[in-house]
Amino acid sequence: KSAFNVRVITYEASERIVRYAFEWARANGKKKVTSVHKANVLDYTCGLYLEASRAVAKEYPDIQYNELIVDAAAMRLVMYPETFEVLVTTNMFGDILSDVTAGLVGGLGMAPSGNVGDDMCIFEPVHGSAPDIAGKGIANPAACILSAAMMLDWLKEEKAADMIEAAVLKVLIDGKVKTPDLGGKNKTTEFADAVAKAL
């Protein structure tokens, strides 16, 4: 038996996502963008992606540009997460690294996400619908709440987004209300109520 997959990378799509990363970095006061790849093995597809990355990086001399092979990026994320500001990569590597970074902040229940297009976006928790715990009332709603904050930020409702993020952070720092994934015994609704109260 044998099998293969075709990996399609275009210059235009690479350029678009890298430009978005630089624009996001600039808009959010970040000074470093790291482009993650596997060009040492996937020389054609990642090579094209890097070509676009380097071209776009030249348009942003005020932002430091770095490149890292995905293996090294995963290791450095675990060992030195504070050295990164903005990561940009292709879909498959981004999917993997987003779960690594979710683990750094407490797990999938803490990780919001946004699928950002040119004209519209979809915001959702990284964990999706979590069918294994559906209906049990134990899901951590932080990722869902923070995804809503990301949506508000994208809609230019920054003040509301900041207030929601601050409320979630307050509940987490306070530590009195924790869902099972965070080592507590509280229900989904109790965590959500605590966030609403913190607002």
Image: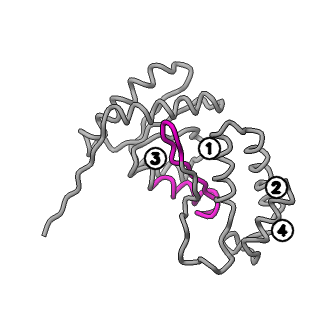
Relative to 156, 129 lies left or right:
left
- Which numbered disc flags the more N-terminal residue, 1 or 2? 1
Query: Reading the chain from its start, which is encountered first: label 1 or label 3?
Result: 3
Q: Residues within 10 Å of mark 3 (few under 14, many from 20)?
A: many
* Cα distance in 3D space between marks 2 and 4: 10 Å
Q: Amino acid at mark 2?
A: Lys
Taking the magenta stretch, the answer to whether it contains residue 152 is no
Q: Secondary structure at mark 2?
A: helix
From the image, tell me which residue sits under label 3.
Answer: 73
- State the separation of the CA atoms marked 4 and 3: 35 Å
Reading the image, the residue beneath label 1 is: 82
**How did the renderer colour the structure?**
one colour
- Left or right of 150 on screen, residue 55: left
Q: Mark 2 or mark 3, which is nearer the start of the sequence?
A: 3
The answer to whether 1 is drawn above or below residue 71 in the figure is below
Callout 1: helix, strand or loop?
A: helix
The magenta segment = 96-121
Which image quadrant is residue 159 in? top right
In the picture of the structure, the residue carrying the numbered disc 2 is: 170
CB under 8 Å between discs 1 and 2: no
